Image: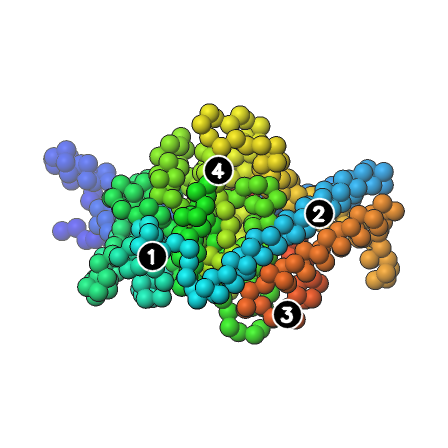
């Protein structure tokens, strides 16, 4: 009798069958412990998968770090005349971006004043809009449910109970990607459906790639009588009159196809950090984006709190060669097809801010990656002809495309290179006092004085306008603090923009 630790003698195998011989030739641990072998292989595969994911996630970070180290090292080798040329180039580009940002901020005052004037007019009429409720079109509020069930249910309750809109013309759609969660949520929504029949839960199609175009195609293929479709992120609560303002704008302005609203970061805490996050949010959604639309003559849907004519939405997602990956991609896709997007500051949606530094970082990197993708896909619109039958792109809109999609991406490199050059000078010309450091970084050449003074003027003007357009969650004392921190914010956003570009490049290569 053979013991588990003793292999069969070779002389005993001569009279056995071929099957036995094949087993005997098999390694000993595979004969007696197949479960451990499978477990070892599974652990090995999981380890390789995790290593691959970690490598893919950290490759963009490694690229940006290498970019910064290489740039700093390179500037330590340049001669003073070469450094002067690069210094002037980067400072000129940065000053141009600051000037354009200030002009956009000034132009943002126009939609802000129009919104406040319209608000006063409706208040004087005791909240009676020009369009009667019976003449309002059907409205579908679509929630991209990617959060917990409690937040989704609270979001649905808020839209059904607080939104001021005729109930027989209002529909709420919950769009889900997770099958199990969707089934659980369907049971939770049964009580709500008993009271409100216009609530539906839709699961995203099971396709190999996830894109906004694919999801919207699936949504529209199920049929809907709504003439206007609005999109919201989960946890983004529209103001009770927000949908009414948006629909009123679309009804009164026949040229408008999309109404992009204002997103407000809601935080009732009085901490410095929460106020700074809120004012940064206002800088983007209350000043920068509306100002760009007013300055360049066209707006773009930014992914949420946007109201579409359903026919325009259908055209944007069905007549495209490549699917729109995200909301910004879809917004530029609609613009390329002649859709007109207007910004309305009365169309407000509230959302909570990031709770951790990781969330804050991830949100900004994701936004930067969206802009990198849009730049790669739609910069060509500045040079191509407008197809027949579509709204013609004039010179101003073409310059706006170049400014938003090309110069802003290059501007991020200019700001980072300026910063790397300053760090490189610290190694070659080590300052002996704080005054020497300030002179080295900001005033090493005579021409820099004029450019920096112009940049500081633009900075002060931009922050002042942001303070005027700030939401109710931003205290007035936060404005001077934002003014002091704004240069550091510019460097931070430039680095984030580079990381977003790197992530998109890695995504293309993968």
Mark 1 or 2: in front is 1
Q: In front here: 431 or 126? A: 126
Q: Please, is residue 293 above or below residue 239 in the view?
A: above
Give how far across and how far down residue 64 sits, in percent.
Answer: 60, 46
Q: In front here: 249 or 413? A: 249
Q: Which secondary structure, mark 2?
A: helix
Q: Residues within 10 Å of mark 3 (few under 14, many from 20)?
A: few
User: What's the CA distance linking mark 3 and mark 2?
Assistant: 24 Å
Q: Which secondary structure, mark 3?
A: loop
Label drawn at residue 99: 2
Give how far across and how far down residue 432 sits, in percent.
Answer: 87, 59
Q: Residues within 10 Å of mark 4 (few under 14, many from 20)?
A: many
Q: Which residue is labeled 3 in the image?
A: 476
The colour mode here is: rainbow
| Residue at the (47%, 50%) spot, across then down | 260
User: What's the CA distance linking mark 4 and mark 2?
Assistant: 26 Å
The numbered mark, 3 or 1, whose residue comes first in the sequence reads 1
| Residue at the (64%, 70%) spot, across then down | 476
Label drawn at residue 133: 1
Q: In front here: 145 or 362? A: 145
| Residue at the (12%, 35%) spot, across then down | 17
In the displayed structure image, the side of residue 388 where residue 226 appears, left or right? left
Q: Which secondary structure, mark 1?
A: helix
Q: Please, is residue 290 above or below residue 399 in the view?
A: below
């Amino acid at each position: 009798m053979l013991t588990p630790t003793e292999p069969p003698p070779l002389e005993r195998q001569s009279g056995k069958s071929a099957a036995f011989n094949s087993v005997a030739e098999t390694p000993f641990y595979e004969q007696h412990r197949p479960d451990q072998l499978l477990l070892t292989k599974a652990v090995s595969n999981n380890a390789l998968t995790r290593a691959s994911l970690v490598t893919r996630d950290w490759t963009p970070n490694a690229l940006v770090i290498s970019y910064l180290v290489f740039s700093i090292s390179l500037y330590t080798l340049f001669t003073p005349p070469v450094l002067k040329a690069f210094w002037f180039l980067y400072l000129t580009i940065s000053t141009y971006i600051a000037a354009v940002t200030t002009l956009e901020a000034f132009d943002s005052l126009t939609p802000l004043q129009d919104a406040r004037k319209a608000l006063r007019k409706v208040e004087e009429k005791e909240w009676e809009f020009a369009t009667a409720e019976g003449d309002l079109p059907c409205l579908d509020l679509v929630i991209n449910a990617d959060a917990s069930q409690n937040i989704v249910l609270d979001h649905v309750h808020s839209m059904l109970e607080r939104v001021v809109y005729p109930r027989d013309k209002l529909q709420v759609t919950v769009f889900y990607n997770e099958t199990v969660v969707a089934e659980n949520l369907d049971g939770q929504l049964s009580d709500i459906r008993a009271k409100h029949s216009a609530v539906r839960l839709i699961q995203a199609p099971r396709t190999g790639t996830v894109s906004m175009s694919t999801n919207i195609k699936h949504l529209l293929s199920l049929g809907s009588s709504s003439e206007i479709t609005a999109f919201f992120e989960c946890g983004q609560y529209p103001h009770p009159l927000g949908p009414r303002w948006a629909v009123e704008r679309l009804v009164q302005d026949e040229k408008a196809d999309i109404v992009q609203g204002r997103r407000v970061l809601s935080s009732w805490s009085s901490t410095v950090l929460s106020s700074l996050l809120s004012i940064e949010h206002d800088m983007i959604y209350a000043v920068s984006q509306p100002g760009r639309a007013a300055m360049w003559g066209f707006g773009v849907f930014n992914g949420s709190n946007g109201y579409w004519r359903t026919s325009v939405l259908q055209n944007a997602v069905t007549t495209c060669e490549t699917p729109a990956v995200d909301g910004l991609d879809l917004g530029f896709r609609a613009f390329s097809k002649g859709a007109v997007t207007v910004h309305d500051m009365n169309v407000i949606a509230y959302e909570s801010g990031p709770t951790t530094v990781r969330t804050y970082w991830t949100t900004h990197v994701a936004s930067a990656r969206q802009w990198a993708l849009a730049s790669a896909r739609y910069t060509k619109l500045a040079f191509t002809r407008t197809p027949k039958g579509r709204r013609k792109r004039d010179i101003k809109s073409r310059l706006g495309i170049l400014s938003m999609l090309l110069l802003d991406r290059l501007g991020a490199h200019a700001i980072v290179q300026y910063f790397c050059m300053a760090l490189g000078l610290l190694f070659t010309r080590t300052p002996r006092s704080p005054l020497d450091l300030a002179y080295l970084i900001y005033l090493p050449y005579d021409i820099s004085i004029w450019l920096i003074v112009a940049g500081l003027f633009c900075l002060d003007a931009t922050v002042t306008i942001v303070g005027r357009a700030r939401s109710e969650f931003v205290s007035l004392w936060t404005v001077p603090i934002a003014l002091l921190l704004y240069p550091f914010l510019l460097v931070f956003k430039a680095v984030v923009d580079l990381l977003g570009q790197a992530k998109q490049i890695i995504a293309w290569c993968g």
